[in-house]
Structure formats: C-alpha cells, structure tokens
Image: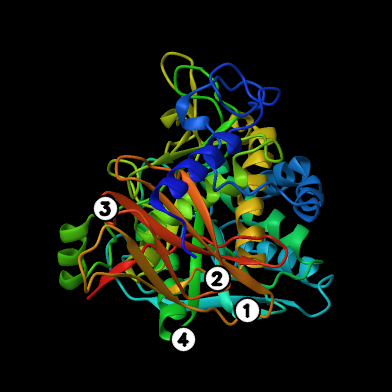
Amino acid sequence: MRPSRRTVLTTTAAAGAAALGSPAEANASGSRPLSPGLSASPEQRRPPSAQPPTRELRALLREIDPDRMEATVRKLVSFGTRHTLSAQDNPVRGIGAARDWIAAELRSYAAASGGRMTVDLQSYIQQPATRIPTATRITNVIATLRGSVTPERVYVVSGHYDSRVTDVMDATSDAPGADDDASGVAVAMELARVMATRRPASTIVFAAVAGEEQGLYGATHMAEQFKSAGADVQGMFTNDIVGSSTADDGTRDPYTLRLFAEGVPSSETPEQAATRRSVGGENDSPTRQLARFVRDVADNDATGMHIRVIHRRDRYRRGGDHIPFLERAYPAARFTEPAEDFAHQHQDVRVDENGQQLGDLPEFCDFSFVGRVAKVNAAALWTLAQAPGTPRGAKIITSTLTNSTQLVWTRGAEPDLAGYEIVWRETTAFEWTHVISAGDVTTYEVDLSKDNVFFGVRAVNRAGNRSPVAFPDPQT
C-alpha cells in the first residue's frame, strides 16, 4: 500500500528534522556540530541524505599522512621546473625526472597491492598546437586499483604535475609549482598509497597528468582514452590548487574546501536541452548529484572539513582537468582551496619592490590542510567505490496527468544490492530534504505532485552504502 500524501509529508518532514541531530548534538541554529574554526551557517545543516562514515572508512582516513604529502610536494619542487616543454631525459631536472619519480613511487605502492594495482605511463605525441610550439611527448602517470566486485565501474582522482611561471612558454626558469599543482598530485598519490592494500568493490584510478598549464592536454588524452574504450566512469575529481588555506589578504580558512560543479552539462545535446527547459533540472546534472554526494559523505567530523559547493564549472578565466571529462559526458568536479593567493601562482620566483616573496614555493603551503583535503577525496572515492552504481534508466511517468508521481528505473546488477530510496526536495532547495525507502523494486509511486517538487532515485547495498542520486527524465 502506497503512503498517502499526508503520510508522506508528515513522516518525511519528521525524518528531515531528526537528521539534523538531536538537541544534544546540534547547536542553537540546528546545525550539526562544526569542525574547529568553522562558524554556523544554513549551508552546513546536515541533509537527511547524509551518510555517516563507516568504521572501515574512519580507519582508512587515519592512515592519511600529511608529513608524507609534504615530502611529496618538496620532492616535486626539487626538480626545478616541471614545465611540459622542459627536459624529458634529464635525471634530476625537468618534467621527465618528475614523471619517472612519480611512476617509481606509485609502483612501490602497487607492490603492496597483491597485484590489484598496476601503474602505466600513458604517453602520446602532441603535435604543434596552442602553447605547444613543437611536437611534444605528454605523459600521464596512471595507477589503477582494480575493483573486486564491479571492476567495470570506474572512479578517477587526479592532480597535474606540470608547472609554470609568469610566461607560460618559459620552460627553463625555476617553476616550483608547490600549490599549483604538486599539492593535487600529493593528494592523488597519498590516496593510492593508502588504498593499495585494500579491496574496493569498483575500480579507482589515481592519475598525475601533464600538459595542464599548456591547455589540459594530458587530461584530454586520458578522458578520450576512457571514452574510446567505453569505460563506465561514474565520477572524476581533479585536485588543483589545494595546498593552502591562506588568502591574498592573509586571512585563513583551514576547514573549508571549494568544490566546483557545473549545472547545465557541457555535453548536453539539443534534445536534452529541450527536456531540461521543459521540466527544470538546471541544478540536477550528474555533476551536481556528485557534488551532493561529496557533501553527504565527506562534510563531517571524520574529515574535519566543510565542503563549499560552487555552482560553476570553474573559476573566471580558469579551467581544470575535469573539463575534458565533462565534455565527454562523465560526471566530474574540481576541488580547490577556499581563497587563492595569486602571488604564489604562475609567478616567477622573486622578491618584488615591496619586499614580498613571489612564487609558488612550499613554504606557502599548509600541509595539515592538504591532509584534510585528501580525507575529503578519500571519503568520496571510497564510498563511491563501495556503494552501488548510480541507478540507470530513471524516469518519471508522464503518460497520464495526476497529482501523484510514479518513478521507474532499471535494477542494478551488484550482488549486494539491497534496494532503492526515493529522495525529493522543493524546487528552490539545493540539498535533498526528504528520503523515502522504496525497497528492492524498480517502480514506486509517491502521493506528491511531480509538478511541485524534484525527485531522485538512489541505490542502497546491504552494508548501507548509498549511490549518488539519479535525476529522472520524463517518460510519456
């Protein structure tokens, strides 16, 4: 028997209130307990869709070592420059030396994986193009941890190991690139180290890519390789400029991490655009669902971080390695520190006329902050890999006009699948505010009008891990 409209409204509102925490757990504003240094805000209210970290995840997060990440950043800086056009055959300086060191480190982690992790150099020759004056070898270093249950489902985390100074074509000057983006590479490498000894259900790819500063060349090649192979990439995160919690005016925000997530998909077809315009959904792209998932699993005491979702593909006049994945219809988002200090990005290393040290040097990084960034990534990736995949074929039946809503979807093939949940929210809300258990079914009817709220479907496995939400298309 389906619940009545009154029952749905009453019970889900009560569940939403309960999910915000008991009076003993909440502060006066109704927010969840905050990490040190955070102030309360409405955005920090814990949504009913949130997933508490498991004991397994907490154990994994405790192994993340900020000191190792600092050593990684300093080692990458020691190569002098990692400009894409710099030397590829010098053993101590240039992008080739950095490439070889990253590969050797990842292979040492893979040695502890029992054969589950492999490391490859994904190379190609980039012919002359924008910011590439001559044919240049571009190499991504890829560590792949094969899933033990659903290996065909893939999640990717990356940072870019190339660097630059003021002149983007200057391949010889020192370009330390500590924050941009040795910090992101350190995140991906530390996650590879910690996860190598574990058995994720789905496949996780840890990537250090080149060519970002010259035009996203390495990431474009990686995304195209996945697309050509028909890979089921259900989530991608790039970590780019995640090394500092200090802004250009000296203010610090060490417990906030920005997550840039586009709304209207970069890959949207004219037919998809027409559907979106007719029913809404500008705020419900697969990437926005991925961002909500990150908030659900990584904005908590286990990471010590607040995730500030930014409703943009990237910052003004900037672009990151998630964009080639978005262009190929893969959900992808970018992690970036809360407020940037441009004196330590894309700058020649020098002291200016005011005595200010310029340049992207490791002394301007906050490695405790980088460690927490790695925990956010780990919480998102591990939960994604252990949870069921995002439901496929989600539809709202519109063949008849009624004041109830019938949803249908395709059952997943995961052996530990337990069932599905329906989520909904007001059209003006960002977070999902209500959750209804549907059971192990592929159709469900809610006594609420599809015209008034947004609905979604997510899968649940027997361990209680939940997938990202699938936003349903209309089906006549």
**Label 2 amino acid?**
Gly
**Mark 4 burial class by Cα count in 10 Å: few <14, some 14-19, many 20+:** few
**Label 1 amino acid?**
Glu
Q: Residue at x 53, y 39 (%)?
A: 16
3D distance between C-alphas at marks 2 and 1: 8 Å
Q: Quadrant of the C terminus?
A: bottom left
Q: Which residue is mark 3?
A: 282
Q: Which residue is mark 1?
A: 414
Q: Work out whether residue 174 can be spotted.
A: no
Q: Nearer the viewer, mark 3 or mark 1?
A: 1
| Secondary structure of the residue carrying numbered label 4 | loop
Q: Which residue is mark 4?
A: 229
3D distance between C-alphas at marks 2 and 3: 22 Å
3D distance between C-alphas at marks 3 and 4: 29 Å
Nearest the eye: 8 or 431: 8
In x, y percent, where is residue 365? Answer: 61, 33
Which numbered tag is attached to residue 389? 2
Relative placement, left or right, of 363 versus 352 is right
In x, y percent, where is residue 426? Answer: 34, 43
